[in-house]
Image (cartoon, rainbow, N blue to C red):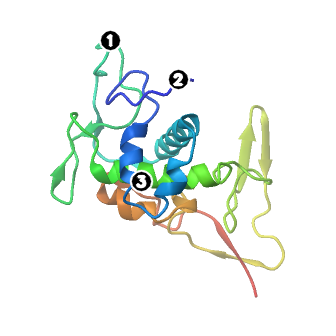
Amino acid sequence: MTFDSTLGGSAANSYASVADADAYSLQRWWGATWAALAQASKEIALMSATQAMETITWNGTRCDPSKDNSDLPQALSWPRFGVECDGLAATCAAIPQSILNATYELAYQLSQDPGVLQPGPGGGTVPGTFRSEETIGDLTVKYEAFPAGVESETCTSCSDPEVITRFPWLKGWLKCWASWGSTNGSGLMYKVRS
């Protein structure tokens, strides 16, 4: 796959360029570690960070058509319009700096632990959360409501994407640009009794 950070591009796969990530890293304690990475590793980290952020429910509307081909939609969720956050209005001319900063921070984290967002044993759930049912093709597996020694608890963020569950600090960067998980207790979470 070819790295493409074209703003609003029809084949874009990164919100940010390597050059911009490099410039940002100069202001961070992890800058030397980032600088030591090969160009290809930086590209993979930025593409992976963008792919993870694409799982977030964003406010506003995706810009359309793409800037490089009026017959095709833009490939990524950003840039957008029709949303304002902290007094800044999103436009099709740029991606908000806080979104870009979150992308750089996440790309660094993924460069250091590439498997952190990969599904683990047991269906890809994170510790402390469980699925009640999974369907793969024609196969559906239903799990028991509560295993021995576990009690139910309502959930305030069960529908957050895994990237937010694994990196909750992203919410601070993304603020009102995004919509967060259910807060009505409709999710399912288990708590082990101590």
Q: Secondary structure at mark 3?
A: helix
Horizontal relation, residue 153 to residue 85: left or right: right
The spot of residue 68 in percent (x, y) is 31, 17
- Mark 3 vs mark 2: which is more N-terminal? 2
Give the amino acid at mark 3: Ser
For marks 3 and 2, give the CA distance: 23 Å
Q: In the rendered structure, are the residues bearing label 3 and label 2 in contact, judged by CB atoms less than 8 Å apart?
A: no
Give the amino acid at mark 1: Asp
Q: Outermost residue toward the top?
A: 71
Relative to the observer, which residue lies in front, 59 or 51?
Answer: 51
Q: Which residue is mark 2?
A: 2
Q: Which residue is mark 3?
A: 25
Relative to the observer, which residue lies in front, 122 or 132?
Answer: 122
Q: Nearer the viewer, mark 2 or mark 1?
A: 2
For marks 3 and 1, give the CA distance: 36 Å
Relative to the observer, which residue lies in front, 127 or 117?
Answer: 117
Question: As displayed, is residue 128 above or below residue 53?
Answer: below
Where, by quadrant of the figure, is residue 188 drawn? bottom right
Q: Nearer the viewer, mark 3 or mark 2?
A: 3
- Mark 3 vs mark 1: which is more N-terminal? 3
The spot of residue 71 in percent (x, y) is 32, 11
Q: Which residue is mark 1?
A: 71
The spot of residue 76 in percent (x, y) is 40, 33
Residue at 75% over, 53% down: 120
Residue at 55% over, 43% down: 45
Near mark 1 (Cα within 10 A), the count class, few <14, some 14-19 or many ≥20, is few
Horizontal relation, residue 193 to residue 101: left or right: right
Residue at 71% over, 49% down: 119
Residue at 34% over, 38% down: 78
- Mark 2 vs mark 1: which is more N-terminal? 2
Quadrant where the C terminus is found in the figure: bottom right
